[in-house]
């Protein structure tokens, strides 16, 4: 268990629908990152939040949005879903590792989204 | 835009053999990460390389970084079946605003054959 909790683990929905993925970072971690992993696009960075504020934005579609709440959990909202949105969505939190001497991302188990 | 390329994309090797995975990136960076992913699972951090010439080793895996060549290698020594997984390198770019973004390579799917 990495300490990063993601729900749901699996989600099947239809095109045009809207879903919300939830992430709780490791205790004490202020940063949350969202990544999308699909077969054709690989691991794509979507967005980063730090202590409730958006810090960096990647290849996130306008149909997608995210936020980080005061308790530091984050939600990724995906709307008007298309077949191509089917992917594994990972959340990660970041903390400084004394052993490594750098910030290291710790990933959750992922949420597998299937759009039919 | 930063590009991170790995090769090979697929690697099938026999137990006991040695091999190297290469990671090239297109923009100056001095932070390079290696992650491992088992099928259908999450990503597990293996190494963080912070400076030119850095070398880290854990068991049968050894990672190195050449920032001048923008190249990192992950060397596998005397491979065993448990090392079968997909290996990703990732490069961190810190923007002018202090925002950190980790860009992942394409991944190398390693299969160790008994």
Image (cartoon, coloured by chain):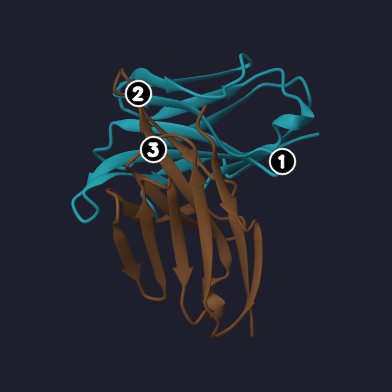
Chain colours: A cyan, B brown
Q: Which residue is at 38% across, 32% downward?
A: B93
Does any portion of residue A108 appear in the rendered image? no
Q: Please, what secondary structure does the residue beneath circle 3 have?
A: strand
Percent of width and height locating residue A102 = 25, 45
For label 1, the residue is A40
Percent of width and height locating residue A90 = 52, 40
| In front: label 1 or label 3 | 3
How dense is the environment of label 2, judged by Cα within 10 Å: few (below 14), some, or many (20 and up)?
A: few
Label pair 3/2, CB-CB below 8 angstroms: no
Q: Which residue is at 36% across, 54% downward?
A: B65
Look at the image and tell me in which quarter the C terminus of chain A lies: top right
For label 3, the residue is B92
Percent of width and height locating residue B106 = 60, 47
Label pair 1/3, CB-CB below 8 angstroms: no
Q: Which mark is residue B95?
A: 2
Question: In 3D space, how far apart are the residues under numbered discs 3 and 2 (Cα atoms)?
Answer: 10 Å
Instruction: State which chain disc 3 sits on.
Output: B
- Do the residues indicated by labels 1 and 2 lie within the same chain of the protein? no
Point out the residue furthest to the left here: A98
């Amino acid at each position: 268990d990495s300490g990063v909790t993601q729900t749901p683990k699996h989600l099947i929905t239809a095109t045009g629908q809207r879903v919300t993925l939830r992430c709780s970072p490791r205790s004490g971690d202020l940063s949350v990152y969202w990544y999308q992993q699909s077969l054709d696009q690989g691991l794509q960075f979507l967005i980063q939040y730090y202590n409730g504020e958006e810090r960096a934005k990647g290849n996130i579609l306008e149909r997608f949005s995210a936020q980080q709440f005061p308790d530091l959990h984050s939600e990724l909202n995906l709307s008007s879903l298309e077949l191509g949105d089917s992917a594994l969505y990972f959340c990660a939190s970041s903390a400084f590792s004394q052993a490594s001497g750098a910030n290291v991302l710790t990933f959750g188990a992922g949420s597998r989204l299937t759009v039919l | 835009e930063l590009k991170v390329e790995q090769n090979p994309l697929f690697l099938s090797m026999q137990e006991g053999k040695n091999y190297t995975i290469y990671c090239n990136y297109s923009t100056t960076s001095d932070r390079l990460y290696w992650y491992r992913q088992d099928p259908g699972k999450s990503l597990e951090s293996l190494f963080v390389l912070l400076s030119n010439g850095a070398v880290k080793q854990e068991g049968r895996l050894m990672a190195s970084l050449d920032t001048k060549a923008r190249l990192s290698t992950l060397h596998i020594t005397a491979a065993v079946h448990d090392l079968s997984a997909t290996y990703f390198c990732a490069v961190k770019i810190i923007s002018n605003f202090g925002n950190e973004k980790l860009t992942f390579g394409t991944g190398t799917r390693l299969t160790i054959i008994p």
